[in-house]
């Protein structure tokens, strides 16, 4: 299986996590929420109750700004996580290296 990457911090998650979200979302809803919330989708049941709304990942990025742009771009490619082509996106957003 492939990994998903949080668009806010770049942390990788196993794709299967979309089947096991805390709120018990269906797969496609989980994918949609992951685009917006990133890691927040998986570890916020408590904070979500406190704040009364879905929580977006606020972790410090573990990848470069260019890679975060690539991750966001990959998520824009499709509603289907299977079609989020991170390799292509990273390739496009990678700063010129010569
Ligand atoms: Zn994150």
Image (spheres, helix red, strand yellow):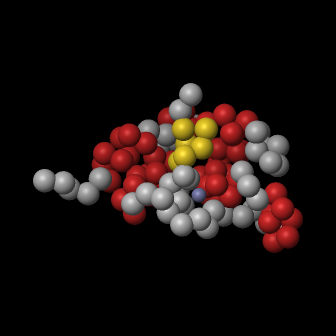
**Where does residue 22 sit, x and y in percent of width and height?**
80, 48
Q: Is residue 70 left or right of residue 9?
A: left
| Residue ranking furthest to the left | 98
Q: Is residue 60 left or right of residue 22?
A: left
Quarter occupied by the N terminus: top right
| Residue ranking furthest to the top | 1
Say which of 52 and 12 sits in front. 12
- Look at 54% across and 61% down and name the residue there: 8
Whether residue 76 is visible here, answered yes or no, is no
Quadrant assignment, res 68: bottom left
Above or below, 16 relative to 31: above
Whether residue 82 is visible here, answered yes or no, is yes
**Where does residue 29 sit, x and y in percent of width and height?**
71, 45
| Ligand 1 quadrant in view | bottom right
**Where does residue 24 sit, x and y in percent of width and height?**
82, 43
Say which of 32 and 19 sits in front. 19
- Look at 38% across and 40% down and name the residue there: 87
**For the image shown, how many numbered marks are present on the structure?**
0
| Residue ranking furthest to the right | 49
- Look at 70% across and 45% down and name the residue there: 30
Say which of 18 and 78 sits in front. 18
**Where does residue 58 sit, x and y in percent of width and height?**
61, 67
Quadrant assignment, res 95: bottom left
């Amino acid at each position: 299986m492939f990994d998903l990457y949080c668009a806010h911090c770049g942390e990788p998650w196993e794709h299967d996590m979309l089947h096991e979200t805390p709120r018990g979302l269906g797969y496609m809803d989980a994918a949609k929420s992951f685009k917006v919330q990133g890691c927040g989708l998986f570890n916020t049941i408590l904070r979500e109750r406190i704040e009364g709304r879905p929580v977006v990942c606020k972790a410090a990025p573990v990848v470069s700004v260019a890679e975060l742009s690539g991750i966001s771009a990959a998520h824009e490619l499709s509603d289907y996580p299977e079609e989020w082509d991170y390799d292509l996106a990273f390739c496009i957003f990678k700063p010129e290296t010569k």
